[in-house]
Structure formats: C-alpha cells, structure tokens
Image: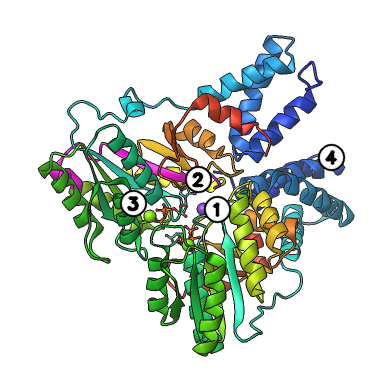
Amino acid sequence: MFNSLSEKLESAFKNLRGEARINDLNVANTVKDIRRALIDADVNFKIAKEFTDKVKEKAVGEKVINAISPGQLMVKIVKDELTELMGGTEAQFNITGNPAIILIAGLQGSGKTTFTGKLAHYLKTKKGKSPLLVAADIYRPAAIDQLTVLAEQVGVDIYSERENKDAVAIAQNAIKEAKAKNKNVIIIDTAGRLAIDEAMMTEVANIKQAVNPAEILFVVDSMTGQDAVNTAKAFNDRLDFSGVVLTKLDGDTRGGAALSIKYTVNKPIKFVSSGEKMDTLDVFYPERMAQRILGM
Amino acid sequence: AGKSTVDEEVLDNLEEALVSADVGIETTVQIIERIEKRVKQDKYVNTAELNNLLQQEIEAILVDAPEQNYKDFDIPEGKKPYVILVVGVNGVGKTTTIGKLAHNYKKAGKQVILGAADTFRAAAVDQLTIWSERVGVSIVKQAMGSDPSAVAYDTVQSAIAKNADVAIIDTAGRLHNKAHLMDELSKIRRVIQKLIPQAPHEVMLVLDGSTGQNAVEQAKQFTATTDVSAISITKLDGTAKGGVVLAIANQFKIPVKYIGVGEKIDDLIIFDKHEFVDSLFKLG
Ligand SMILES: Nc1nc2c(ncn2[C@@H]2O[C@H](COP(=O)(O)OP(=O)(O)OP(=O)(O)O)[C@@H](O)[C@H]2O)c(=O)[nH]1
Ligand SMILES: Nc1nc2c(ncn2[C@@H]2O[C@H](COP(=O)(O)OP(=O)(O)OP(=O)(O)O)[C@@H](O)[C@H]2O)c(=O)[nH]1
Ligand SMILES: [K+]
Ligand SMILES: [Mg+2]
Ligand SMILES: [Mg+2]
C-alpha cells in the first residue's frame, strides 16, 4: 500500500539534497511522512502527533540534514525512540504467592482463552509450575469446553462449575481447589467484555478484589485500530493491570496499537502471541515491534 | 459549532475525526480533498452545510448491496438452498453472526441449516451447536479435526435433501497471510460447487469493528480467494467506529450488509449508510 518508510524518507532527503538550503521546514515535511506512516500502522492519531513532534526536536538537534545518509539517520532516530518508548524497564513476570494468581481480561475475541492455554504451557514447561486453569467465562457459548480442550492439550487441570452463574465465586472456589490439589499457579480466564459495559467491568473488578492477583494481564488483538487507546485506558482505570499481551502477531498487521497502549497506560507488554498452537508464545522485544510498526 | 465558514481548522478537525474512526489516511485525504473542492465551488459554506456535504460524500463511497430482499431475509428467486459461506480472521465474530443470521432467517419463516466447518478451533463445533439449539435450527457436523470441505459438502447436500431454504457454513478463523489456510477456503468452494454450481451464493466476510487498517488487507486477500460478496462488521456496540470499511468500500466495492451490536441473538442490524456515517462523527 505504501513504500516502506525508510525508502520513502531516503527519497525525500534525496530530493532535498539538490536544494540550496536545507532547513527546518524540510525536516517538518519528513516528519509529516513519518506521522502518516505511524497512522497507517494504526498508531493513535494524537499519539502519532506528539511522538513525531518529539522526534522532530531530536532530528533538528542531531543535525540530521547534514548527515551523510539523512533518511537512514532519521529512521534510526524514530526507531530508537519507538523502541525506548515501548521497552523501558525490564518487565518481570510475577508468580509469587501460593498459588500465584493470574487474571486475564480483555475485549471479546482478543485471544484470552487461547493465551490462557499458552501461558499454562509456558509456566509448566519453562518454569516448572503446576498450573490450574479457571473457567470464569460464564457467558460465551462453549467457553468452558474451549478451555477444557486447551487444558487437555497442554496437560494441565481445569476448574469449572457449569451451573454456577457467579464468576467471582468460581474464582474464589478455584483457589481452594488449587490449595487442595497443590497447584501453585492459577490462571483465570474471563469473558470478553466491552470497556463501556458497566456491569461486566464491575464483574471483573470484583474478581480482582476477591482474589488479589499477582498479575493482571490485558489481552489485546494486535490488529486493533484507533480505539485501542480508549479500551486500554478504560480497562486500566478499572483494573490497574500489570501487563499487556499482544495477540495474533502471526498476521501482517503493523501493530501500532502496541505503541498507543504503552504510551497511554505505561504498562509493559509482557507477552506476544503468534499462532493458534499452544507453544506460540514469546516474550516481547521492543526493537522488533518498533521495526514492525515502521514496516522495516 | 461556533464556526460559520469552513477553514483550515474545520478541515483539520474533520481529518482527526475520520482518522480516529479508522478511516485511514488515504481515504481521509481523498474525502477532504473532495470537500475542499466543493467548498471552493460553492464559495461560502457554513458548518451545517458542511455536515451535509460530508454525509453525501462519504455515503457516495459506500457501495449499495445488490437488489435483493436481504432486508426481509428473503432468498432470491431460484436460489434454494441459498448457500452462505462465512469467512474471516480469528475471533472477529463469525460464529456469533451466523447464530444471529439464522435467527433472522428463521423469524422470516425460512428453514435454515448450519454447517460446522470449523473443525479446528477448540470447541468450535460445540459453540455452533449451542447457537443452533438457541435458534432452533438443525446443524450438520462431524468430529473435530475432520475435513472442513467434507462438512461443507454434507451441509449443502443435507440442505438439498431437506428442501431447506438457507444453508450457512461456519469456517475456522484464519489469518489472510496464511496461504495454506486460504487454500482450504478455495477447496470448500470447489466442493460445494459439485452440488450447486452457483454456490456459495453469498460469501460473507466478517470484520471486527475494532480492527484498524489491517482490515483492508483482510478484505483484499479474502476477496482474492473467495470472491467476497458482502461484509458484516461486528462489535459496533463498543467505542470503535469501524471506519475502515470506508477504505474497503472505496477500494473493493463490496457492500456492507449487517452490523453486529452485541452478543445476543437479536444483536444484528441491517447496515444503514446514513446512520453509519452519522456515527463516525459521534463522540465517545
Ligand atoms: N493466528 C492466531 N490466532 C489466535 C491467536 N490467539 C488467539 N487466536 C485465535 O483467535 C480466536 C479467538 O481466540 P480466543 O482465545 O477464543 O479469544 P477470547 O478473547 O477468549 O474470546 P472471548 O472469550 O470470546 O472474548 C480463536 O480462533 C483463536 O484460535 C494468535 O496469536 N494467532
Ligand atoms: N460486543 C460484541 N461482541 C461480539 C459481537 N459479535 C461477536 N462477539 C463476541 O466476540 C467473541 C468472538 O466471537 P465468535 O463468534 O466466536 O468469533 P469467530 O470469528 O467465530 O471466532 P473464531 O471462530 O475463533 O475465529 C465472542 O465472545 C462473541 O460473543 C458483537 O457484535 N458485539
Ligand atoms: K478482535
Ligand atoms: Mg474466551
Ligand atoms: Mg467461530
């Protein structure tokens, strides 16, 4: 749909070279190209603006226009800024507590249940843990069956109550079960919900309050567009989540939502999910994500 | 409000509104250029008139669904059973949309059969089975892991045998950049065509309303593989606007037929251009 950004910038600067005077205005035009590229990658409109304004200052400061290869330098500045923004301090994953309690939340269809299975697989095979999955989605048709199948695939136990219509009670009961069965991690899969659904947001906030999780992970589809900011903010306001999970990165989305979310709520992206199989889970590499957003 | 003429600031605000609704830069710029041109032509335009212009320009981009009584959930003459193949990437709302569609067809007095051709995703068949029970229509299914095109074939065959009006086939979510999964859809089509050469009569691409610019690529790849004939946009009960369908309509000329506004059986609405465009500019 569009040239890769570095190509575009390189040619923009090539054109500039012929000009007698290279000035701030030229940088401003290039910055506009970068802004568009970010918006094309689904970075939030306002954030793209703020971000590129910052980059512009840097670029002028570093005298990009006098560089041998200004396009490349410009892209490097952008990439480094993006990387720093999305990375920050090393994200730890907290599995303290016995059992350690992990709460999963997010919009409908974002990949929560699949991630729940994957996380169990990861904790079991990489961390030697003994997880218990908790089916706290009491709404979606066959949600319990879905989690049951995944638990079987991964070889872990699941806790569910088919007749119970109280997600909070199910989560609480699961903790007792975990203690009785010597499970040291419990992962609570919740129903998908919209941030504006007051009753449902209250439910998940109540689960949080009742079980006091070590980690609350907000699961978000990497294909999400401009609305990522609103959703992340609303979930964070209610849950003060501890980390973000980006899913479906095996697609070809540029994934600008990752930047928007980090920028808005400043919570670390702790995992990325890239497939439907249980072993397609990875930790997050900010630099890779920066390159992806820039189409590099 | 407050502004009486269309100036730079008004156009900037317009750009922000469109981009924030996921319309995308390219289509947004196109729309703004057209508005600018018309504003120049008409010399003096106030903001109220601008809203009208805008509404017109954007509605012009959206394609009309072909002449067909889909509003009454009637089936076109001579197309019985009317076969609908539902496709899309993972988690967009295909299965749920099928449940709602079946409900609407049934309400319109049609006999409906569902086909559970997602034999891959955990409990996908169970999920569609619950929907079939909820709606009160029959379902054709096989064991998990079986060949989806065999299920599709069975479904159409059963629809013919039972003299059903509509057969709706669910497929597994697949990312459009996975060639082998996309090939599977071509195979499903080929197999159905052994029974009814013109089938599927409708290929419904389901898009998640919260998806950004990647939906354009989805439309492109699914259209290339399956000749998408209609779009449903789901999850418009949230704060996302689904503006990317403007870009899609602009590029691929595919009509939007339905929108999903919830998880319940009645939460399917027939797409209305005017309301949709209106909602693009509503706050929240
Ligand atoms: N390709 C791909 N598909 C994924 C990934 N994660 C999840 N999925 C698929 O996305 C769809 C939705 O995933 P679920 O795990 O059911 O999502 P959910 O958030 O639990 O959905 P609800 O419970 O309905 O809100 C399923 O088809 C999954 O197989 C991923 O990383 N890559
Ligand atoms: N709020 C809202 N949720 C919806 C809507 N349509 C579907 N959902 C929810 O989105 C989630 C995914 O829906 P599915 O119908 O399972 O999606 P799918 O495309 O069949 O998913 P896969 O088969 O896994 O690819 C479920 O939790 C649905 O209840 C809608 O219009 N609004
Ligand atoms: K989604
Ligand atoms: Mg789920
Ligand atoms: Mg499905």
Instruction: Establish whether labels 4 and 1 are both on one chain.
Output: yes
The magenta stretch is B192-210
- Badge 2 vs badge 3, beta-carbon distance below 8 Å: no
Q: Chain of mark 2?
A: B
Q: Chain of mark 1?
A: A
Q: Residue at x 18, y 34 (%)?
A: B80
Where does label 1 land, which residue? A223
Can see residue B180?
no
Q: Amino acid at mark 1?
A: Met
Residue A25's mark?
4
Please give left or right for residue A193 compared with residue A269 in the image: left
Where does label 3 land, which residue? B131
Label 3, secondary structure: give it: helix
Q: Earlier in the sequence, mark 2 or mark 3?
A: 3
Q: Amino acid at mark 2?
A: Ala
Residue B130, position as x, y percentages in the image: 33, 55
A156 shown above or below A51:
below
